[in-house]
Image: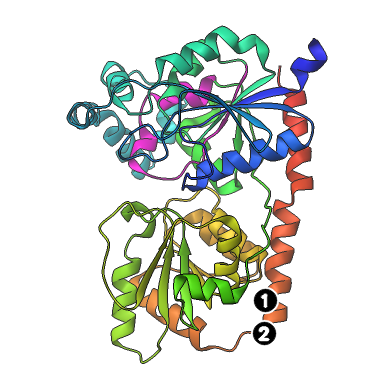
């Protein structure tokens, strides 16, 4: 029985499924499936939703098997957008105050004496319970069945259930926060989560340093775990171009098409098109969560399967990641694993560090002018493809191979009390 327990783990995540867009959600699926492949008994506890906006059930409540992983889906509390927005507004002063202290370089000094903050706690709990993902049934299941698992691994800190799970089962919880510098990351309730969980598994050293600066010396023990990559073989380029009516030259973005992820990409790209005769187009792949811009130089593919995505990356002239909110960036790593040049937002310290650590196999920009200049240069310069592939593939293999990640995971579970 004890031996079985040592190899049984569950992952808790907001959304889970083949149809789900999002880096953290894909991260969870990749890690869960690899851990199961390595001999662990794996379960995933999640919602019935396939997106974070409508909170309309897409999957059935109950159990299903996805790629040898048992998935348990739970009902969430009824969601009302007006109630959520009101609770968000009423609870925001705690995060505003903490973020201000951080920007003034004072937060680190204060958390040395007061690591856990109760500021606005009652209002924050009300806000968490108004979130569409909040599930008393899931939280209750974890509490009653905690003895079944060696570890309860929670992925992506914004999920409201994590705060309540940490309160009832702190000793078995491992948090993979996928954290970045944004407003809600300074919520006072997170001081409970980041100091009470048994362990925090970060994606990068940049993310780890950010969290140490915010939560101080009382932050839970931590390490770098990250995730490996499995690249699905591509469909043929002929089938790909026919299906999506692709041009010969295109820039590719893949992931959630949402304002917080793509920022000014569309506006800046269209400006670039006004100052150059280059026929290059922009291809956007993934779920659409913002107003669609109709333009002959912008192509929306919608949701694509992994084999199609691989083909899209391989056929692209350039990959772009305009997000300033990254804890790892599977987009960047998948493109690099396929030997492609990538242009990223340097305001994300994680993306910037990837460029530096890979000896600038990828490039970053810091402003609109910088974006236009780098884009123009990367599109017009003849690339030594073999040298680029050597640099990008070596970087991914050295830092994100599954053999490395699996060893880290095994060690982490062995150390868990």
Q: For the residues labelled 1 and 2, say whether their Cβ atoms are less than 8 Å apart.
A: yes
Task: Point out residue 11 in the picture as x, y percentages from the top left corner.
Answer: 59, 28
Residue 282: name its quadrant. Answer: bottom left
Which type of secondary structure does the marked residue at label 2 adopt? loop
Residue under the image location 40 percent in, 87 percent down: 279
> From this viewpoint, is residue 286 visible?
yes
Task: Point out residue 292 in the picture as x, y percentages from the top left corner.
Answer: 27, 62
Which type of secondary structure does the marked residue at label 1 adopt? helix
Eyeballing the image, is 52 above or below 3?
A: below
Circle 2 crowding by C-alpha within 10 Å: few under 14, some 14–19, many from 20 = few
Q: Which mark is residue 315?
A: none
Which residue is disc 1 drawn over?
A: 388
Eyeballing the image, is 165 above or below 35?
A: above
Residue 265: name its quadrant. Answer: bottom left
Residue under the image location 75 percent in, 28 percent down: 40
Give the magenta part as a residue range.
172-196
Which residue is disc 2 drawn over?
A: 384
Residue most extreme to the bottom? 277
Residue under the image location 65 percent in, 40 percent down: 31
């Amino acid at each position: 029985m004890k031996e079985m327990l040592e190899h049984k783990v569950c992952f808790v995540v907001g959304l889970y499924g083949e149809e789900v867009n999002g880096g953290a959600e894909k991260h969870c699926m990749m890690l869960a499936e690899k851990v199961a492949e390595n001999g662990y008994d794996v379960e995933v506890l999640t919602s019935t939703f396939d997106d974070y906006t409508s909170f309309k059930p897409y999957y059935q409540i109950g159990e299903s098997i996805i790629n040898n992983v048992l998935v348990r889906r739970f009902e969430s509390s009824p969601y009302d957008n007006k109630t959520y927005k009101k609770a968000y507004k009423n609870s925001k002063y705690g995060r505003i105050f903490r973020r201000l202290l951080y920007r003034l370089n004072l937060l680190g000094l204060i958390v040395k004496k007061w690591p856990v903050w109760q500021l606005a706690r009652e209002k924050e709990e009300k806000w968490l319970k108004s979130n569409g993902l909040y599930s008393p049934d899931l939280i209750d299941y974890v509490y009653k069945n905690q003895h079944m698992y060696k570890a309860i691994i929670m992925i992506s800190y914004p999920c409201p259930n994590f705060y309540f799970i940490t309160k009832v089962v702190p000793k078995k919880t491992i948090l993979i926060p996928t954290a970045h510098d944004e407003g809600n990351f300074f919520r006072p309730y997170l001081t409970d989560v980041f100091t009470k969980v048994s362990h925090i598994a970060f994606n990068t050293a940049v993310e780890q340093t950010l969290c140490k600066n915010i939560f101080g010396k009382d932050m839970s023990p931590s390490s770098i775990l990250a995730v490996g990559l499995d690249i699905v073989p591509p469909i043929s380029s002929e089938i790909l171009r026919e299906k999506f009516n692709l041009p010969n030259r295109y820039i590719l973005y893949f992931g959630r098409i949402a304002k917080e992820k793509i920022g000014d990409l569309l506006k800046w790209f269209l400006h670039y098109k006004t100052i150059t005769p280059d026929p290059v187009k922009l291809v956007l792949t993934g779920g659409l969560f913002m107003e669609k811009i109709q333009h002959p130089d912008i192509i929306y593919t919608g949701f694509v399967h992994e084999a199609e995505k691989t083909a899209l990356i391989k056929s692209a002239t350039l990959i772009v990641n305009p997000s300033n909110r990254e804890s790892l960036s599977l987009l960047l790593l998948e493109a690099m694993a396929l030997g492609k040049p990538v242009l990223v937002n340097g305001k994300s310290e994680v993306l910037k560090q990837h460029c530096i650590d890979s000896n600038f196999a990828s490039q970053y920009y810091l402003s609109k002018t910088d974006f236009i200049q780098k884009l123009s240069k990367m599109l017009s310069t003849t690339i030594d493809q073999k040298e680029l592939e050597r640099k990008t593939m070596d970087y991914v293999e050295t830092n994100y191979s599954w053999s490395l990640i699996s060893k880290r995971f095994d060690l982490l579970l062995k150390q868990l009390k």
